[in-house]
Image (cartoon, grey):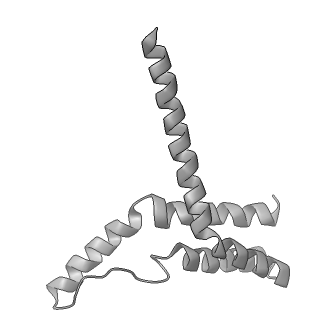
């Protein structure tokens, strides 16, 4: 598979896990309970693990090292993917919401008959 596609897929996976799945909220909630119990305040974020930009950057770099393709153009591409991680997240949400609206429209159309 093309390394550019692989990096895009890594980015999509990171964005799904960090931003869309709820996993980050779950473990930050657990960590907040733990730290509050021992006299510290709640944990709101723990970078790089709660930041899709940071995680995209580091996961893409790790992927490049694993694949043995750590070159300047690919590092720059990884930086671009990290930079646009919030945009990609919003695009994924828009696609999901659009498909849900389309399904609702089809259901309303079917229910009329």
Residue 59 appears in which quarter of the rendering?
Answer: bottom right
Relative to 68, is 84 on the left or the right?
A: left
Residue 70 % position (x, y): 79, 82
Residue 10 appears in which quarter of the rendering?
Answer: bottom right
Residue 68 % position (x, y): 79, 78
Task: Relative to 98, say whether 15 is above or below.
Answer: below
- Quarter of the picture containing the N terminus is bottom right
Q: Residue at x 22, y 80 (%)?
A: 34
Furthest residue in direction bottom, as rendered? 39
Numbered marks: total: 0
Task: Relative to 27, say whether 101 is above or below.
Answer: above
Q: Residue at x 30, y 82 (%)?
A: 43
Q: Residue at x 76, y 81 (%)?
A: 75
Relative to 62, is 102 on the left or the right?
A: left
Q: Residue at x 47, y 78 (%)?
A: 49
Which of these two is toward me, 40 or 61?
40
Residue 47 % position (x, y): 46, 83
Residue 108 % position (x, y): 45, 21
Relative to 73, is 31 on the left or the right?
A: left
């Amino acid at each position: 598979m093309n390394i550019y596609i692989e990096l895009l897929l890594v980015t999509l996976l990171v964005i799904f896990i960090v931003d869309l799945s709820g996993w980050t909220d779950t473990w930050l909630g657990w960590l907040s309970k733990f730290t509050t119990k021992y006299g510290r305040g709640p944990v709101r974020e723990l970078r790089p693990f709660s930041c899709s930009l940071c995680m995209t950057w580091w996961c893409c770099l790790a992927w490049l090292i694993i694949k043995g393709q750590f070159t300047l153009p690919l590092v720059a591409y990884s930086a671009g993917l990290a930079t646009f991680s919030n945009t990609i997240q919003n695009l994924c949400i828009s696609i999901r919401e659009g498909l849900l609206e389309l399904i609702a429209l089809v259901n309303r159309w079917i229910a009329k008959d």
